[in-house]
């Protein structure tokens, strides 16, 4: 067999391997074929598609560029290059690539359709909508354009219009893989839980083994108060995907929500055996131990979670609160300082950080962050209450009273505020009486 025939044989083998999902082996066969004949643009294109399947977008772009070195007017390669550049966040390069297609072949509709995605990721939703209408001039009914525009509308909070776009997607392509799920998400965001449930259940009919659908439906059913059905779906997901940690984690959360602590512990430990770094699992396990009055075990779990989730603001917020609940202000302070770096405009993050500083007797820093919380959220009774306490500890009764008075205008029925107000009133009265006595004594002495 000569080397040209060997190259063709390798390409055929690559196709078979690709279909079986053995992408790394398929890529190796294609590279071997390309070594024999480097000028076959189709092989470079197939190699790029294989890298896409592996989610290796850098090498996919390199392969598409190699196609374009052979044929600069290959609009499919240009389009795919633009898509992958968008995936990597290189939006300006992606737009230049799509614009190049418009010069080569102005009627190539995907060049407009995919720009909807690029502009949406850039936050330029007006341009995204313009691309939708330009695409319609070339191809009036494109399900993918409707789907992409729906995402743009969803991101900017126009949920009803987004749902209309996704329904139009399904009318044009009933088998579209994600439109039903996006309608479910939008319905859930609008608290239309029944519609969300119908969409998820409809998707399960089409894809009964879909892990994400089973997990989302399980979470939704818990919100609807249908705990048994939720657990049934989550357990089905765990049985179908025994090597996945997520279903076990979700079962653990469901059990924790019902205060079934032994069951929650078992599921969460199973999740961590599958994936020791699964985000959130150590924190939930810490909550289990906290409720079971095992504070040392809880702390160990929460400390492990810090190493895993130090870039996740929501988890850090919850970790900080749990450490405060465990009376571990030093650990809470460490977590919350990281949180305000990631989310400096969050008043709750600054307030909780302030509380940790107060517990560490670092009152000046606590006051600073309490004031930052109030700048971000002036109507924050808890921050006003804690700031009043801080000034009271400094002996600044008048300033403390002003903060409590403002807090009471926001929440006049809060018993803690009312008690503090009465305490400050008594302190203020005593200091005025004492001032008069001292003044009298001085006059008498004179």
Image (cartoon, grey):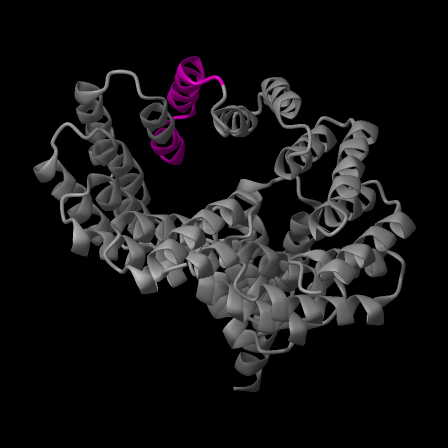
Above or below residue 299? Residue 188 is above
Q: Residue 364: image x %, image y %?
A: 51, 76
Q: Is residue 24 left or right of residue 271?
A: left
Tell me if residue 151 is in the magenta stretch: yes
Q: Quadrant of residue 397?
A: bottom right
Q: In this view, does 366 lie to the left or right of 424?
A: left
Q: Is residue 161 left or right of residue 392?
A: left
* Furthest-bottom residue in this view: 446
Q: What stretch is highlighted in magenta?
A: 150-174
Front residue of this view, candidates 334 and 189: 189
Q: Which corner quadrant holds the N terminus?
A: bottom left
Give the residue displayed 73% in from the left and 52% down from the top.
243
Q: Residue 35: image x %, image y %?
A: 33, 65
Q: How many labels does the image show?
A: 0
Q: Residue 121: image x %, image y %?
A: 32, 44
Give the residue displayed 50% in from the left and 53% down from the top.
23
Tell me if residue 373 is in the magenta stretch: no
Front residue of this view, candidates 32 and 105: 32
Above or below residue 253? Residue 372 is below
For the stretch drawn in magenta, the main secondary structure is helix
Q: Is residue 432 visible?
A: no
Q: Quadrant of residue 116?
A: top left
Q: Residue 141: image x %, image y %?
A: 29, 16
């Amino acid at each position: 067999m000569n080397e040209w025939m060997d190259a063709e044989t390798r390409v055929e083998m690559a196709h078979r391997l690709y279909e079986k999902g053995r992408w790394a082996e398929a890529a190796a066969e294609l590279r071997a074929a390309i070594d024999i004949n480097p000028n076959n643009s189709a092989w470079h294109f197939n190699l790029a598609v294989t890298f896409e399947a592996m989610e290796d977008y850098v090498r996919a772009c390199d392969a598409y560029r190699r196609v374009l070195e052979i044929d600069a007017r290959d609009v499919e390669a240009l389009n795919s290059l633009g898509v992958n550049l968008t995936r990597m966040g290189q939006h300006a390069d992606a737009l230049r690539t799509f614009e190049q297609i418009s010069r080569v072949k102005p009627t190539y509709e995907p060049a407009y359709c995919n720009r909807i995605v690029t502009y949406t990721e850039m936050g330029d939703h007006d341009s995204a909508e313009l691309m939708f209408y330009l695409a319609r001039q070339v191809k009036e009914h494109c399900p993918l354009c409707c789907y992409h525009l729906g995402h743009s509308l969803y991101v900017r909070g126009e949920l009803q219009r987004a749902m209309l776009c996704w329904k139009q997607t399904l009318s044009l392509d009933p088998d579209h893989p994600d439109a039903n799920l996006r309608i479910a998400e939008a319905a859930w965001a609008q608290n239309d839980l029944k519609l969300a449930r119908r969409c998820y259940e409809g998707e399960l009919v089409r894809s009964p083994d879909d892990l994400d659908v089973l997990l989302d439906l399980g979470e939704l059913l818990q919100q609807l108060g249908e705990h048994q059905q939720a657990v049934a779906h989550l357990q089905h997901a765990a049985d179908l995907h025994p090597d996945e940690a997520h279903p076990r984690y979700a079962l653990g959360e469901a059990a924790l929500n019902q205060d079934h602590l032994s069951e929650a512990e078992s599921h969460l430990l199973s999740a961590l055996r599958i994936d020791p770094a699964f985000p959130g699992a150590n924190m939930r396990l810490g909550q289990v131990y906290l409720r079971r009055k095992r504070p040392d075990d809880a702390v160990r779990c929460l400390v492990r979670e810090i190493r895993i989730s130090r870039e996740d603001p929501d988890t850090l917020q919850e970790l900080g609160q749990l450490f405060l609940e465990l009376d571990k202000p030093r650990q809470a302070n460490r977590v919350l300082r990281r949180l305000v770096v990631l989310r400096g405009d969050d008043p709750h993050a600054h307030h909780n950080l302030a509380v940790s500083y107060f517990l560490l007797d670092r009152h000046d820093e606590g006051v600073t962050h309490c004031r930052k919380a109030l700048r971000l959220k002036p109507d924050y009774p808890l921050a006003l209450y804690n700031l009043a306490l801080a000034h009271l500890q400094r002996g600044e009764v008048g300033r403390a009273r002003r903060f409590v008075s403002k807090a009471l205008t926001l929440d006049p029925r809060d018993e803690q505020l009312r008690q503090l107000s009465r305490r400050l009133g008594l302190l203020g009265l005593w200091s005025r009486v004492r001032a008069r006595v001292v003044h009298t004594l001085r006059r008498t002495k004179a």
